[in-house]
């Protein structure tokens, strides 16, 4: 599998990611991205009173690197 996290693509991500950003970055379907953000250990920011799912870019990229190191399947 090719390295999904490259300097250029990572730099193009906004600081606060939406599930659609995660799906586009990883090349997966939106439904798969929603399943992914619900998995234990995924860096989701839950905001009281707001239903929107927010993910920190830096925490997400760190999660991607750790997932590739420990063999966790992203797709």
Image (tube, helix red, strand yellow):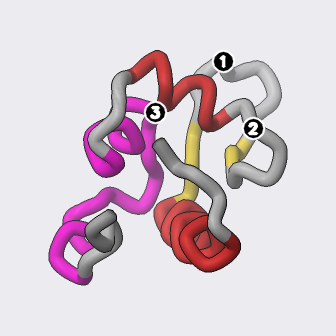
Q: Is residue 51 left or right of residue 10?
A: right
User: Magenta region: which residues?
Assistant: 7-26
Outermost residue, left side: 8
Give the secondary structure at mark 2.
loop
Question: What residue is shown with label 2?
Answer: 39
Instruction: Compare residues 19 and 31 and report the one nearer the observer.
Output: 31
Q: Main secondary structure of the magenta part?
A: helix
Give the secondary structure at mark 3.
helix
Instruction: Compare residues 25 and 58 and report the one nearer the observer.
Output: 25
- In this rendering, which labeled residue sits more in front, label 1 or label 2? 2
| Residue 8, above or below 67 | below
Q: State the image quarter where residue 4 is shown.
A: bottom left
Question: What residue is shown with label 1?
Answer: 51
| Residue 31, above or below 25 | above
3D distance between C-alphas at marks 1 and 2 = 17 Å
The residue that appears at 63% across and 67% down in the rendered structure is: 71
Question: What residue is shown with label 3?
Answer: 19
Percent of width and height locating residue 36: 61, 35
Instruction: Tell me the crowding category of disc 3: few under 14, some 14 to 19, or many 20 or more residues within 10 angstroms, Cα based.
Output: many
Percent of width and height locating residue 61: 49, 69
Q: State which tag comes first along the sequence, 1 or 2.
A: 2
The residue that appears at 62% across and 25% down in the rendered structure is: 35
The residue that appears at 52% across and 49% down in the rendered structure is: 74
3D distance between C-alphas at marks 3 and 2 = 13 Å
Percent of width and height locating residue 39: 75, 37
């Amino acid at each position: 599998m090719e390295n999904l996290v490259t300097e250029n693509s990572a730099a193009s991500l906004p600081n606060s990611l939406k599930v659609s950003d995660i799906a586009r970055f990883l090349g997966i379907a939106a439904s798969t991205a929603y399943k992914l953000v619900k998995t234990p250990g995924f860096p989701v920011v839950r905001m009281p009173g707001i239903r929107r799912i927010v993910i920190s870019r830096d925490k997400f990229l760190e999660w991607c690197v750790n997932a590739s190191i420990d063999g966790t399947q992203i797709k």
